[in-house]
Image (tube, coloured by chain):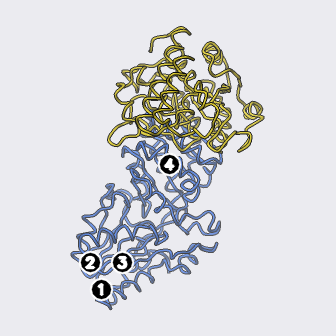
Chain colours: A yellow, B blue
Amino acid sequence: MSQTLDVLALKELARDLRLDVLEMTTRAASGHVSSSYSCVEILTALYFGGVLRTRADQPHWPERDRVFLSKGHAAPIFYAVLARAGYFGRDELWGLRTVNRRAEGHPVQDRLPGVEMTSGSLGKGISVALGHVLAGRLNGLDYRCYVLLGDGECQEGQVWEAAMAAAHFQADNLIAIVDYNKFQESGPISREMELEPFVDKWRAFGWHVEEIDGHDFAAIIGTLQAVQEVRGQPSVIIAHTVKGRPVSFVEADYRFHGKALKPEQAEKAREEILCA
Amino acid sequence: MRLGEKAGLQPARQMRDVFGDALLDLCRKNEKVVVLDGDLCSTTKTLRVREEFPERFFNIGIAESNMISIAAGLASCGLIPFASSLAGFILANGYDQLRISVALAGLNVKIVGSHGGITLGKDGPTAMAIEDFALVGGLPTFTILVPSDPATLYKAVHAAAGHVGPVYLRSSREAMPHIYPMDNCPFQIGRANVVRQGRDLTIVGCGIMVAAALDAAAMLVEEGIEARVLDMHTLRPLDRDAIVAAARETGAMVTAEEHLLYGGMGSNIARVVAETHPVPMRFVGLADTYTDSGEAEDLLEKYSLTANDIVQAAREIKRNT
C-alpha cells in the first residue's frame, strides 16, 4: 500500500504531479494536459489518500483494489501517479508517446505495470470493472473497483449499458467517479451534447450518487470512504472540476484539449502551478 | 441431393445443439470457464450451462458491447469467459470492445458466433454473418476456428479453452453431416486436416463447405479427377505448410467458404500460394451481395455455395491448365 498522506502533503504532491505532466507532454510535444489537470486531485487522493489497498511491487496481486482509467486521454497524469506510487521508474514518463517506449499515448493494459485496462476509445471502464466485480464473487475476493470517467465520455452508449448492468448485478464494490469539467473537445458539454440532468440519469439507472468539488482533497477522500458503506447498488461520484486547473490561460480556452503546451507556454504554466 | 450424401457422410444433429452440449461438457471439466450471453441462450443452446451452473452464467442482456468488455474484465481475473451470441451481432456490435478491451492486450476471451453464414436462413440477412471472418481478421492476436462437423465443433470448443489468448469460434445453426467419427477426430489449432487424398487439384473448405467439397470430390471422380480435400478448421494461424504442400503436389486449388469472398478465407490462402508456389486458383464463396431470407438449401443454391459450384470451378481450372 502507498503511504497515506495528509491534505497538505497531498496538495504538494498534486503540484509536483502537475509539473510531471507538463514536463512529459512538453517533451513529447503531444498529450492531453487540460484533461489531466482536471483529475489530478481525484487520482492523487485515490493512490495516496489511504483509499486503495494495492501493492505496487505486485501489480497483479489478486486481492488488490482496482483503478480503471476509462478516460484514457488522461494517460499523462495516470502514468505520473503510477510512477510516484512505485509501479515503475520515473524514466518511463519521459518516453510518453515515443516509439520503443512503454508510455503509450493512451493506456494499453499491462504495457506498464498498474495499467489495468486498455482505454482510448471511450466508454469501456464500467464494463471492464463489472467483469472484475463478477470475477471477484466467483473467486471469493472482496476488492473494490474504481472507474474514472470523463464527462464527454458519458455520451457513449456503452456507459449506460454498463450502468444498467452494474445496478442489475448490485455491484456495490464498484465506484465510478466522473471528472465533470464541463468541456469536451469541440466546446462546452452543454452546447455540444448536454448531459444534464446528470445526477437524475445515474439515479434513474439505479446508482447511489454523490456530488463533490473534485479538487477538494477532504471532500474526495471523505466521499470515497463514505460510499464504501453503500450496499446493494453501485456508487457514482460526480466530481465538479475545472479543465486545465490551475493554469489560467488553459482554463480559459477549451481549444487546449488534446494539445501540449509550447515551451514558452509551459514556462508560464509552471510559474502559475508553483504559485497556486 | 442431401449435403454429404454423394460423399457417403452420415447426417447429424444441428450444430447449435452440439455446441450446447460441448460447452456444458467443458464447464463440467473446467471450473474457470464462465459463459456470457446476449439474451439468446435458448437459441444458441447455452441455456444448458445456465441450468446446471447458474453462478457461472451471466445474461448481460441485449448489449453486446458491454458483454465483450465485461468478458475482458473476467479474463483479466483468470477466468475463461465464453461470450456467445449470433455471429452477426456479437462482432458487429462489439467490434470496438473486441479491439480495445480484448485484442490489444491479447486477453484470454473466447467469442462464439453462433448461426454463422447464410444457413440460418429464414431470419434473413440482418441476422446472418457473411463478414465475420473479415471482421475478426482485422483483430491481430485472435485465433479463428471454423468447425466443419459435430466432432470438430466439440474439439474446437475444448481447444479454444485450452489456448491462451483470444479466440473466435464460428458455429452454425444448421446441421452439418459427420465428417469424422465423434471419438476419433484429429484437431490441432493451426493444422489443417486432409480429409481426402488426391493429386489432381486441392479443394480447401471450412465449415459447411467441407462436406460440400467432399461431395464435389466424389462427383469429380466420375470425370477422372482425384481431388485432395483440406478441412481448414483454423483460419488464423493458417496452416501454411498444408497450403504449400497442396499447391506443390496438386498444382491447382479451389477454396470454398460460407462467407463473402471479399476478406474471406480464400483471399488469405491465395496470399500464401502467391508467396510460395503460385498455382491456378478459383474461389467459391458469396459474391459482393447480401442475400434473401429463406430455406438454407435454397439460399446455398441461389448464391452458388454448393458442391456443383465447386465442381464447376474445378472443371474450369482443369480445362485451362
| Residue A235 in sight here | no
Which residue shows up at 65% across the image and 66% down it? Answer: B123
Q: Nearer the viewer, mark 2 or mark 4?
A: 4
Looking at the rendering, which quadrant does residue A90 occupy? top left
| Up/down of A50 relative to A114, above or below | above
For disc 4, the chain is: B
Helix, strand or loop at mark 1: loop
* Earlier-in-chain disc, 3 versus 2: 2
Q: Are marks 1 and 3 in contact (CB under 8 Å)?
A: no
* Earlier-in-chain disc, 1 versus 4: 4
Q: Which residue is mark 4?
A: B98
Q: Amino acid at mark 3?
A: Val
Could you give the CA–CA distance between mark 1 and mark 2, rounded to whole angstroms?
8 Å
Same chain? Circles 1 and 3 = yes
Same chain? Circles 2 and 4 = yes
Q: Which residue is mark 3?
A: B254
Which residue shows up at 37% across the image and 59% down it? Answer: B234
Q: Amino acid at mark 4?
A: Leu
Q: Which residue is mark 2?
A: B198
Helix, strand or loop at mark 3: strand
Which residue shows up at 52% across the image and 27% down it? Answer: A269
Q: Amino acid at mark 1?
A: Ile
Could you give the CA–CA distance between mark 1 and mark 3, rounded to whole angstroms?
13 Å
Left or right: B304, with B188 as reference point: right
Say the numbered circle drawn on residue A139: none
Q: Residues within 10 Å of mark 1 (few under 14, many from 20)?
A: some
| Up/down of A180 relative to A225, above or below | below
Q: Which residue is mark 1?
A: B225
Left or right: A106, with B124 as reference point: left
Q: Nearer the viewer, mark 1 or mark 4?
A: 4
